[in-house]
Amino acid sequence: MFRIGILGSDNSHAEIFSKIINFPDPVTGEYVYPDCKVVGIFGLEKERTEQVARDGGIEFISKTPKDLMGKVDAVMTVFRHGDLHLPYALPFIEAGIPTWIDKPFTVKTEDARRIIEIARKRGTLIDGGSTTKHTYDTLMLKQEVQEGSRIGRVKTAVLNFPADVDSEYAGIHFYGPHLTEITLATFGYNPKSVIASMTGDCVTAILKYDNYQVIMNFIKGHNEYYAILYGEKGTIIREIDISITYKHGLEKFINMLRTNKMPMTFEQLYAPVEVLNSIEEAYKTNKEVKIKSL
């Protein structure tokens, strides 16, 4: 049995992940992960933490993160603000405990680099980021980009997802990772540079690859998600369904615990943080920004 601890209760993800793991599927009546259980939670807000524990079937509420040590085999760090992920996740990573770090993986690139540095040093398994990169639609788009079975070689593309540059949770870094990770999962983790601009509350970024460029529209309050791929032989317009994206992402994490293998490379975990920071720099400076690798 893998005993899982939750770090952070303010995010709805704490409750969602706990329910998926701790309760039987309402349709089949069976546990999706019978070898896993969320056994403890730490949160900064007492009432909210108690609510998540109650609704998520979590028996132990930890007064400090340290109190989870020895009681868990893995942790999921799910604070809404990405600046909290480094300080709360790092002690567990240093202890060699497999760790999920929700989106945004981090806000600052130096925080992401520090997490990866310690994970490498300690040999700790880590995973996380936006679960939207694992949706069936994203996987279909990725396959078309790689194989070109319907539209041939991709010439350019347009995608959208909501984001709020004025969010109290580090602005565009709160929801921006969703679009960023869908884009990177689909077109590759090696973009070269980006230009971007902001009009009103919409940010438009042009992510440049070697052979094409991808237009990314971060649109506040726009809750329909689409991708348009333009190829040599045709066009694909596809809605991106994220309705079961939590299950897709959780499946990757649980499989990591079972196989002792990370589903993503350190470079892939780092890239969205670097790209989103580059996008933010680009629309604030009106300059093209080169994208650095890990």
Image: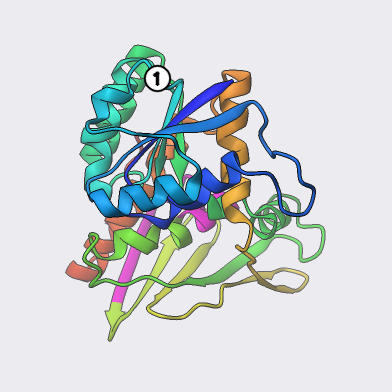
Is residue 215 in view from this perspective? yes
Q: What residue appears at the point 38 percent right and 63 percent down from the top-left corner?
A: 175
Asked which colour scheme the image uses, the reply is rainbow
Rendered residue at 68%/60% (across/down) = 137
- Confirm whether residue 81 shows in the render: no
Residue at point 43%, 61% (across, down): 207
Position of 220 relative to 188 (above/below): below
Give the extent of the magenta segment: 181-197
The reply, left or right, for residue 87 in relation to residue 127 is left
Q: Residues within 10 Å of mark 1 (few under 14, many from 20)?
A: some
Q: From the image, which quarter does the N terminus lie in?
A: top right
Amino acid, disc 1 = Lys
List the residue tagged with mark 1: 71
- Within the magenta stretch, is there residue 188? yes
Q: Position of residue 39 (x, y in %)?
A: 46, 31
Q: Locate residue 261 relative to residue 24 in the image: left or right.
A: left
Residue at the (28%, 43%) spot, across then down = 43
Q: Is 264 displayed left or right of 269 in the figure?
A: right
